[in-house]
């Protein structure tokens, strides 16, 4: 999720360049050179790729093949049993009788293939469910929301102005909690990927959610700069600036 991506009419593509990195491609399949950091969005895989990349640790398609091989071994066992029942005559691929039960190999093959496909579909669905639940950023946002609730039991809205400010310590605590995701990214990333999901359930500002205070210093900054640099500047200012 990024404002420049959300406003674009281009359907971007992605190329895998690492175990946890994707390279964004534009409509002409060229790499997007401008930095557009995001930790949210939707990646749509074709059905074939979805089956191939699901069901960790082995792809669902591989597991389906494995089940088919097991089914083939079962068919061989049935043939050997039929050969024994028929006095050593090897039965053809059709219907033969073992212990008064008729086995149609065509039906068995269809059943095995159907079972493999069903397994692949179920494994794909479970893999998507697990990957959604284990997404690290939403999990950390939920944890941080609980941390804020412990210090501000009943967050509520307040009027805009000098009474809706945050302390330098609150800002640094925020950075410390999300440092793994923030790194050297800017406020464009922070707002879209962290602040909006964090404050959306209560429909409050971050200051209202964290516990607002009275303004001592008003700070204006450019969203395109690295957020960690901004926090470092605030920290140094708090250490050397005289009180109001």
Image: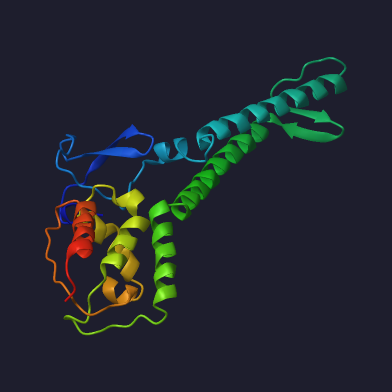
Q: Which of 243 and 75 lies nearest the eye of the viewer?
A: 243
Q: Nearer the viewer, residue 76 or 132?
A: 132
Furthest-bottom residue in view?
Answer: 159
Question: Residue at 21% across / 85% down in the picture?
Answer: 159
Type of colouring: rainbow
**Residue 34: quadrant of the picture:** top left
Q: Nearer the viewer, residue 119 or 93?
A: 119
Q: Quadrant of the N terminus?
A: bottom left
Can you give x and y, in whole percent of width and height, for residue 28 in the image?
15, 36
Query: From what the image shows, is residue 169 above or below residue 73?
Result: below
Would you say 244 lies left or right of 170 here?
left
Residue at 36% in and 80% down: 155
Q: Is residue 22 in view from this perspective?
A: yes
Residue 127, compared with residue 101, is above or below; it is: below
- Who is closer to the viewer here, 165 or 53? 165
Q: For the image shown, how many numbered marks are present on the structure?
A: 0
Spot occupied by residue 84 in the image (x, y as percentages of width and height): 85, 20
Give the vertical position of 18 relative to 39 (above or below). Answer: above
Residue at 72% of width from left, 28% of height from top? 74
**For residue 72, side relative to residue 7 (left or right):** right
Q: Position of residue 208 (x, y in %)?
A: 29, 77
Left or right side of 241 for 126: right
Q: Position of residue 228 (x, y in %)?
A: 24, 53
Q: Quadrant of the C terminus?
A: bottom left
Q: Is residue 205 visible?
A: no
What's the residue at 86%, 34% (across, down)?
Answer: 100
């Amino acid at each position: 999720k990024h404002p420049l991506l959300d406003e674009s009419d281009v359907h971007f593509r992605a190329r895998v360049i690492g175990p946890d990195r994707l390279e964004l491609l534009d409509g002409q399949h060229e790499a997007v050179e401008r930095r557009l950091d995001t930790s949210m969005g939707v990646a749509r895989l074709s059905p074939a790729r979805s089956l191939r990349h699901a069901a960790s640790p082995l792809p669902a398609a591989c597991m389906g093949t494995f089940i088919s091989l097991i089914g083939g071994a079962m068919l061989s066992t049935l043939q050997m049993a039929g050969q024994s029942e028929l006095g050593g005559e090897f039965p053809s691929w059709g219907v033969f009788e073992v212990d008064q039960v008729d086995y149609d190999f065509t039906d068995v093959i269809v059943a095995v293939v159907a079972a493999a496909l069903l397994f692949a579909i179920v494994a794909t669905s479970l893999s998507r469910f697990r990957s959604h639940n284990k997404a690290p950023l939403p999990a950390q946002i939920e944890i941080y929301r609980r941390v804020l609730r412990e210090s501000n039991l009943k967050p509520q809205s307040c009027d805009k102005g000098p009474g809706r400010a945050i302390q330098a310590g609150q800002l640094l605590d925020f950075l410390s909690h999300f440092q793994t995701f923030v790194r050297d990214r800017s406020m464009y990333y922070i707002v879209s990927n962290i602040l909006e999901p964090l404050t959306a359930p209560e429909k409050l500002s971050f200051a209202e959610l964290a516990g607002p205070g009275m303004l001592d210093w008003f700070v204006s900054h450019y969203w395109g700069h690295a957020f960690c640099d901004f926090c470092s500047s605030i920290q140094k200012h708090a250490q050397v600036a005289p009180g109001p």
